[in-house]
Image (cartoon, grey):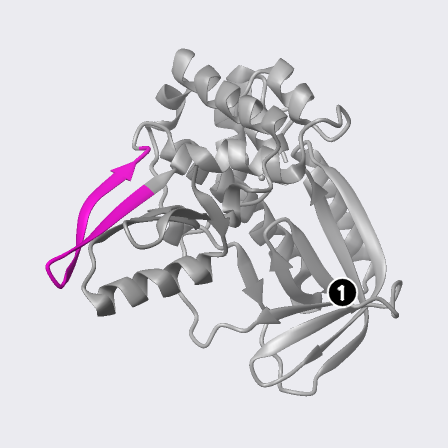
Amino acid sequence: MAKVEKSKSILEKALYLSKKGDEFTLRKINNSFTLESKWFGNCSSSANKKIAPIELGFIKRVKNYIIKNMVYDNFMETLYYPIDIMYVEVKKYPPETEFKRIVEIDIDEAYWKTAQNLKVISPELYEEGSKEFGKISKFGRLVSLGSLAKKEMIYSYQGSRLIRSEVKRSTLTENIWYSICKRVSDVMFEARNIAGENFVLYWVDGIYIEYNEKKIQEITKMFKSYGYDVKVKDNYKAFYTENKVVVEDLNNPDTEKNQRQFFIAKQARKNTYFTDDQLKKTALKYSKYGAMDDLDEDEL
């Protein structure tokens, strides 16, 4: 059985072995690492340590359902790649800019709900995985979907050379995951456009805007029109430094984790976003499966 260690520790061991000239095999599966060597034995990063046994079975059943029912056939028309997806966007302001009243508008269970809307999972799996059912964590839900795009890279150190000997991809199902991410990203970008000059940043499935009651209502209405549950949290403030924006939760001023930091990209990148009309047409595309009424996922 492999020892569980932090990724940093495993990478340091791999570096040590490479300097010694000892043979080893390093596997990278998404964000987790496994090292196999005579010197250190087998050790894995702690990425999978959080997954409870009940969730491991659930993750497998989600994948089995998708394969058995050939759900991937519905996601062959348009292919997406990580570069197509903007998980975070931060609006640039000069350093020392401060907003004294910021509101967070958050989509609840965004990826899991989107998987339901796009008919990736069955109603039974959706209910079992939802937080109302209470047995599967947010992390477990995200792993069950993120594993559809599992990518394993295998490196072998042989005779003073580190060789990438193999790359294994989930080519059959990976576009399902990217389609889910793209849908959430497009909806958040639509929210950004609604926010306009009040926009500060969005992060995966939540958007921060300078307080504006009309904009809050419009964004909330838009999220709900796509079938999402929405949470609105008030009483934040935000301030800018040279390379990041810090959002502070004034509801919990005395806690150690009442601040979140978001780094500002040095260069704007080219993205392929849907316009509002394109997004609605995409939603309409899935209406024949009943998704239009439900339209608007934790963590790999």
Q: In the displayed structure, would residue 285 be above or below residue 263?
A: above
In the foreground, 59 or 11 = 11
**What segment carries the magenta color?**
152-170
In the foreground, 177 or 162 = 162
Indicate the position of residue 37 as horizontal and vertical percent values: 28, 50
Quarter of the image with the N terminus is top left
| The image quarter in which residue 14 lies | bottom left
Q: Residue furthest left?
A: 159
Indicate the position of residue 115 as horizontal and vertical percent values: 55, 29
In the shown orientation, is residue 270 left or right of residue 228? left
| The image quarter in which residue 68 lies | top left
Residue drawn at (69%, 41%) of the image: 223
In the shown orientation, is residue 75 left or right of residue 257? left
Amino acid type of the residue tagged 1 in the rendering:
Lys
Residue drawn at (51%, 47%) of the image: 47
In the foreground, 27 or 234 = 27
Callout 1: SS: loop
**Is the magenta region chiefly helix, strand or loop?**
strand
Indicate the position of residue 293 as horizontal and vertical percent values: 65, 24
Q: In the displayed structure, would residue 150 be above or below residue 126?
A: below
Question: Can you identify the residue that label 1 sits on?
Answer: 257
Residue drawn at (32%, 27%) of the image: 172
Q: Which residue lies furthest to the front in this view?
A: 39
Q: In the displayed structure, would residue 298 be above or below residue 161?
A: above
Residue drawn at (23%, 51%) of the image: 155
